[in-house]
Image (spheres, rainbow, N blue to C red):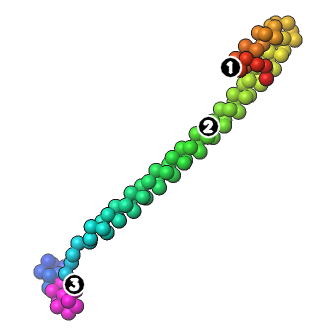
Amino acid sequence: MEKTAVGLDRQIARYCALHMPAPWTPAPLSEHQLTALVKHLGNLEKLKQMQENRQLVAEAYWRMSVICQNSVIARNWWLTQGLIQNGSCSPQESVIYACPDSNTIL
């Protein structure tokens, strides 16, 4: 095998003389459009997967925040029950300590 441009030209000329391949033509526009659409679909699928992953993480953080919030509310409730029993605060004041958002003792 020759590695010079002239040698390569000779090999191409010999191949074409023996096999007579059809002349090269660019791919049709429809093929280019299909290729672009398939690539775009792949990008959309990646974006969808990234969004689903973000959603899973957000839901996990939300569940943890609800658990923590419930834990804090329960702790405050038990603390205010102790304050009421000791006479340090009234049941009306305990509502504020136990659950300021809902105005009820849990």
Task: Please name the amino acid that badge 1 sits on.
Answer: Asp
Mark 3 vs mark 2, CA separation in Å: 62 Å
Earlier-in-chain disc, 3 versus 2: 3
Above or below 49: residue 7: below
Magenta-tinted stretch: 12-21
**Where, by quadrant of the figure, is residue 61 drawn?**
top right
Residue 14 in the image, given as x and y percentages of width and height: 17, 89
Residue 78 in the image, given as x and y percentages of width and height: 81, 20
Is residue 8 visible in this depiction of the protein?
yes
Quarter of the rendering occupied by the N terminus: bottom left
Above or below 86: residue 78: below
- Secondary element under disc 1, as helix, strand or loop, is loop
In the image, which disc is placed on residue 22?
3
Earlier-in-chain disc, 2 versus 1: 2
Q: Nearer the viewer, residue 84 or 41?
A: 41
Instruction: Report if residue 74 lies within the magenta region.
Output: no
Above or below 46: residue 98: above
Earlier-in-chain disc, 3 versus 1: 3
Task: Please name the amino acid that badge 3 sits on.
Answer: Ala
User: Residue at position x 14%, y 77% from top?
Assistant: 5
**Where, by quadrant of the figure, is residue 86 drawn?**
top right
Circle 2 Cα neighbour tier, 10 Å, few/some/many (<14 / 14–19 / ≥20): few
Eye-nearest disc, 3 or 2: 3
Instruction: Report if residue 19 lies within the magenta region.
Output: yes
In the image, which disc is placed on residue 61?
2
Circle 3 Cα neighbour tier, 10 Å, few/some/many (<14 / 14–19 / ≥20): few
Left or right: residue 94 versus residue 37 is right
Circle 1 Cα neighbour tier, 10 Å, few/some/many (<14 / 14–19 / ≥20): few
User: Residue at position x 21%, y 78% from top?
Assistant: 24
